[in-house]
């Protein structure tokens, strides 16, 4: 702290000392008001005035805070007094860090404090001898004795050079010490609310009025009123907050002598300008009119008036309430769907958002108790239609997406889900266990000013960040690879995969590398990871992340996922993670464009791609691996077509089965959905929703490969034996799939494929167990007879012809 | 992907030697636990598209499946050859260098960020420094909490450093971990 000299005026000094003197046995607190000025090269704090505040509270913080808050001075230096006459002073300065720090302590106040007027001490002695200190009043005095409630007058001024500042202490009773100087800069003073019921003595008023010389007539009236109302003071003290506040709040208590008079006067006259003065002038005048000295007046009139006013107010409130109730009742009882005319009208103008939202809520309410609440003559369908339209227009979805969501969720949950999509999920980060531990990382980050918590009990490496003073993606720890920013849902597929050390793992869609680095961390940099990414521009971030996190066991390659089995060889790895490219309907909170850009064709294309990828993934895995043989399929989408349908397809196409993911929270996947019927083991898959689990919409499924065969006819019915013949032996499955993308989606399409494979299996060059294949075939029926064989061959040829023509037609 | 030839190998080893001295032996001969084989193999250096990778043998063998066009990265990249044929170490080699560094420098917390922005290390930011540094030696820069921040070349010996004024440069910056954010594309 810079060396500061303090110059204290006589007024302030004397008030200060006398205040302390008055309460010899207590600690006294007060505020010194002044300004910092620079002259003669040194910084000087000139203390203009002092406001004695309290003497009964040592725990001064709440009161002090209130009073300080009201003081409108940002750079406030407070000298708060300690006990005793010889103050042990502690200087508190408020600096930008918003903490009060003790800047220095002065053992002997006089060493730093200099009085401007040397005569101060003499005057002081005089006052002491005449026991003037009895008259000092501070904020606490009213607690001692209510009649003593002539508190300090602190009144807020809208700066007006004409108006004079008020002083801290009631001048009537106190020492109007010193002449009031007009300081060069106006100081601001504040009304201390609820701390005092500053009452002015009538004699004082008169005195002031006399001094000023122009008592406005209304004032006199007020005086009378006020005197009568004086006893209301008691009421005020105990009355309900609402009433007394308005009365007391901007109490304008008087200040000393001239200032007070002129203040009040000018305040009164400028009540128009001074918004604070306003009605409260009445109130203020109130108090002023009733002085402590004048205790007995006629109360009943005032009381009656007050009561009348109160009653009127209460009545009005009641009326307002009743009306509101009426309005609400009207609306709710009569909720009806808008007629066509209304809809047309609404479409003409801009959408009326609050109205739409209200309607959404109403419809949800009706639907939840349909029998009772429904409108005559309308069906559930009508309500749903209207709901869909409203949701689409209010939240910005296209029809398709809303339709899909409506099919998946009941109305209440639907609204919850959509609301959850509007807000972002919390930022999470994952500790890199190759370099540090979660505890240590949390400590370091907390030291940097990040507010974080462990993620959940299901993760030992996750942390969720609430807020942060430093950019969380640019700390030195991030750059050193101690953690990775990742959403909570991305932890799940890797946790389900559970890679072991010294295994071979493939991550088929690896960029930007969050899951790959997690896998490497779980494997402790042993074994081998193939990280594959199809898009070249995402490869950079993948390699950068791998190097940053200190992963050394990874080979990064740039292939299309479908080609990977050819590159790496079939049945060669232990585990595969396929975080498939999807429509992104689970991460709408990150990317709003999904709301409007997805259509049914997009979903079908995604599903087609995912089916191909999952077959490739399954083909890469070695069923006979010692520790592995698992495939984890995950998407960040909630569409059934992209999730359960793909898994079901895989179950039918390959010899795999679903195993529990190891994630016990999360909803089980659908076994049936509208017209789809899936394999019952699909309840082992897991779905995650933002409104339930507070993470992005996600789907995880874990498959175990039972054998390395590519079965052809595991689940097909015998009647399909004669169906569409296959085209060519080896790639029949894949070719047919590629040739008929749109049929894949439906049940029928897949059935046809099954039939195809069944026949194509005869020619398949895949490694097969002939015994089991035959067994499967025989399950369905006898050996096909000669006629059947020839018939199937004919059909094959026909089909080939058809295919050629249809392809030509397409092109 | 191919192995390094004589010339390239000498260049790489020279650069690494500046930082690690005799610990170079450790780098070359340490057992590698990567790869699915039960016994640890050795590490070797491979060159792919002008970048040199430090990778375990078992990984290398399996990476031969991947086509040249499609292979992006193996193990750890330690540096790259410029068009002029000289070899520069990149920041991704920090892990290896830091583990085997002979000469180290620790930075005060206040000057960490400055180094991470790419500035040289000034005498005023120096916390600790190992002895027996000669000018032109490779130095690895750490923070006071022993987090490796990057590396560079020493300008003065340890003794001379003590006599420098606070704004003198002690370590010329070569690479720092801030590059992961600043220059992700160039890595």
Image (cartoon, coloured by chain):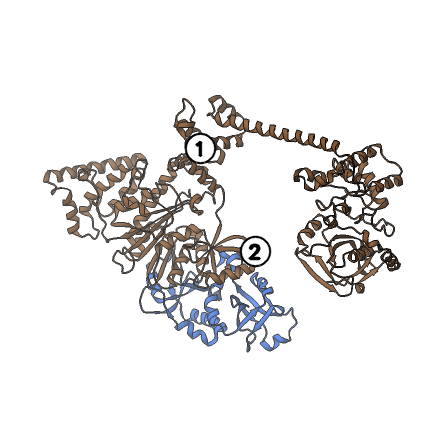
Chain colours: A brown, B blue
Q: Nearer the viewer, mark 2 or mark 1?
A: 1
Q: Residues within 10 Å of mark 2 (few under 14, many from 20)?
A: few
User: Mark 1 Cα within 10 Å, few/some/many (few <14, many 20+)?
Assistant: many
> Which quadrant is home to the C terminus of chain A?
top left
Q: Residue at x 60, y 78 (%)?
A: B159
- In the rendered view, would you say A264 is above or below A659? above
Q: Judging from the image, what secondary structure is the residue with disc 2 in?
A: loop
Q: Which residue is mark 1?
A: A364
Instruction: Establish if A25 lies above or below A655.
Output: below
Rendered-image quadrant of the N terminus of chain A: bottom right
Of pointers 2 and 1, the one earlier in the residue sequence: 1
- Chain holding disc 1: A
Residue situated furthest left in the rendering: A786
Say if residue A200 shows up in the picture: yes
Where residue A194 sits: x, y (%)? 70, 44
Query: Which one is in front, A69 or A582?
Result: A69
Residue B7 is left or right of residue A71, and the answer is left
The answer to which image quadrant residue A609 occupies is top left
Q: Which residue is tagged 2?
A: A470
Please, is residue B59 above or below residue A280 in the view? below
Residue A620 is labelled as none
Residue at 57%, 28% (x, y): give it: A322
């Amino acid at each position: 702290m810079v060396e500061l000299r303090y110059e204290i005026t006589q007024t302030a000094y004397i008030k200060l000392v006398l205040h302390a003197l008055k309460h010899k046995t207590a600690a006294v607190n007060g505020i010194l008001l002044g300004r910092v000025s620079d002259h003669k090269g040194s910084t000087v704090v000139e203390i203009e005035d002092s406001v004695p505040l309290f003497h009964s509270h040592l725990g001064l913080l709440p009161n002090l805070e209130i009073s300080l808050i009201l003081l409108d001075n940002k750079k406030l230096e407070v000298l708060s007094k300690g006990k005793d006459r010889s103050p042990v002073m502690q200087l508190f300065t408020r600096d930008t860090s918003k903490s009060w720090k003790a800047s220095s302590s002065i053992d002997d106040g006089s060493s730093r404090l200099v009085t401007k007027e040397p005569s101060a001490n003499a005057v002081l002695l005089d006052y002491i001898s005449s026991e003037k200190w009895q008259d000092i009043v501070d904020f606490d005095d009213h607690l001692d004795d209510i009649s003593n409630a002539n508190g300090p007058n602190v009144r807020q001024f809208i700066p007006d050079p004409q108006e004079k500042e008020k002083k801290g202490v009631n001048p009537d009773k106190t020492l109007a010490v010193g002449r009031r100087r007009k300081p060069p800069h106006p100081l601001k003073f504040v009304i201390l609310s609820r701390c005092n019921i500053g009452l002015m003595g009538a004699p004082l008023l008169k005195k002031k009025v006399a001094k000023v010389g122009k008592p406005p007539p209304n004032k006199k009236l007020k005086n009378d009123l006020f005197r009568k109302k004086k006893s209301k003071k008691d009421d005020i003290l105990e009355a309900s907050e609402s009433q007394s506040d308005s009365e007391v709040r901007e109490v304008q208590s008087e200040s000393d002598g001239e200032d007070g008079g002129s203040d009040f006067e000018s305040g009164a006259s400028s009540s128009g300008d001074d918004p604070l003065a306003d009605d409260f002038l009445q109130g203020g005048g109130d108090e002023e009119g009733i002085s402590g000295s004048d205790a007995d007046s006629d109360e009943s009139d005032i009381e009656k008036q007050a009561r009348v006013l109160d009653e009127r107010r209460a009545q009005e409130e009641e009326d307002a309430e009743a009306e509101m109730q009426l309005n609400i009742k009207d609306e709710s009882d009569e909720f009806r769907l808008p007629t066509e005319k209304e809809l047309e009208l609404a479409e003409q103008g801009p959408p009326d958002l609050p109205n739409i939202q209200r309607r959404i809520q109403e419809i949800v309410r009706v639907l939840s108790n349909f029998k009772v609440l429904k409108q005559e003559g309308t069906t559930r369908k009508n309500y749903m239609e209207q709901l869909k339209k409203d949701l689409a227009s209010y939240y910005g979805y296209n029809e398709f997406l809303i339709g899909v969501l409506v099919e998946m969720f009941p109305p209440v949950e639907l609204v919850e889900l959509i609301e959850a999509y509007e807000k972002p999920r919390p930022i999470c980060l994952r500790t890199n266990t190759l370099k540090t531990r979660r505890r240590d990382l949390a400590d370091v980050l907390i030291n940097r000013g990040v507010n974080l918590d462990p993620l959940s009990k299901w993760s030992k490496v996750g942390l969720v960040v609430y807020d942060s003073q430093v950019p969380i993606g640019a700390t030195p720890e991030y750059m050193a690879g101690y953690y990775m920013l990742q959403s909570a849902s991305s932890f799940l597929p890797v946790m389900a995969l559970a890679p072991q050390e010294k295994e071979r793992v493939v991550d088929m869609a690896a960029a930007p590398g969050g899951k790959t680095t997690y896998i490497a961390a779980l494997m402790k940099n042993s074994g081998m990871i193939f990280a594959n990414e199809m898009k070249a521009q995402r490869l950079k971030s993948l390699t950068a992340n791998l190097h940053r996190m200190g992963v050394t066991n990874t080979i990064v390659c740039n292939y299309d996922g479908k080609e990977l089995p050819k590159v790496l060889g079939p049945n060669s790895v232990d585990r595969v993670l396929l975080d498939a490219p999807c429509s992104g309907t689970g991460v709408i909170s990150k990317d709003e464009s999904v709301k409007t850009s997805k259509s049914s064709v997009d979903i079908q294309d995604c599903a087609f791609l995912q089916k191909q990828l999952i077959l490739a993934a399954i083909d890469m895995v070695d069923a006979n691996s010692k520790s592995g043989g698992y495939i984890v399929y995950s998407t960040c989408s909630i569409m059934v077509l992209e999730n359960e349908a793909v898994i079901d397809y895989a179950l039918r196409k390959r010899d795999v089965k679903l195993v529990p993911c190891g994630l016990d929270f999360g909803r089980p996947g659908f076994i049936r959905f509208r017209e789809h019927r899936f394999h019952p083991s699909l309840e082992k898959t897991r779905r995650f929703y933002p409104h339930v689990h507070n993470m992005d919409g996600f789907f995880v499924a874990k498959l175990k490969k039972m054998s390395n065969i590519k079965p052809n006819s595991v689940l097909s019915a015998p009647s399909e034996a004669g169906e569409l013949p296959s085209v060519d032996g080896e790639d029949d499955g894949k070719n047919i799939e590629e040739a008929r993308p749109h049929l894949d989606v439906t049940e029928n399409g897949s059935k046809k494929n099954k039939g195809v494979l069944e026949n194509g299996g005869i020619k398949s060059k895949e490694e097969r167990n002939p015994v089991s294949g035959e067994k499967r075939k025989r399950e369905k029926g006898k050996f096909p007879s000669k006629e059947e064989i020839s018939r199937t061959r004919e059909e094959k040829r026909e089909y080939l012809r058809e295919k050629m023509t249809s392809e030509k037609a397409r092109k | 992907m191919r192995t390094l030839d004589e010339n390239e190998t000498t260049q790489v080893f020279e650069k690494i030697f500046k930082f690690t001295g005799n610990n170079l032996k450790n780098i070359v001969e340490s057992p590698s636990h990567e790869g699915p084989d039960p016994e640890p193999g050795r590490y070797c250096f491979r060159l792919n598209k002008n970048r040199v990778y430090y990778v375990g043998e078992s990984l290398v063998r399996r990476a031969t499946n991947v086509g040249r066009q499609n292979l992006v990265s193996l193990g750890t990249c330690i540096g790259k050859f410029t068009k002029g044929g000289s070899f520069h170490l990149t920041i991704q080699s920090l892990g290896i260098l830091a583990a085997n560094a002979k000469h180290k420098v620790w930075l005060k917390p206040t000057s960490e960020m400055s180094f991470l922005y790419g500035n040289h290390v000034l005498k005023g930011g120096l916390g600790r420094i190992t002895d027996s540094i000669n000018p032109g030696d490779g130095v690895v820069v750490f923070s006071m909490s022993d987090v490796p921040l990057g590396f560079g070349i020493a300008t003065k010996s340890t003794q001379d450093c003590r006599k420098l004024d606070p704004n003198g440069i002690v370590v010329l910056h070569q690479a720092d971990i801030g590059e992961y954010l600043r220059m992700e594309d160039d890595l």
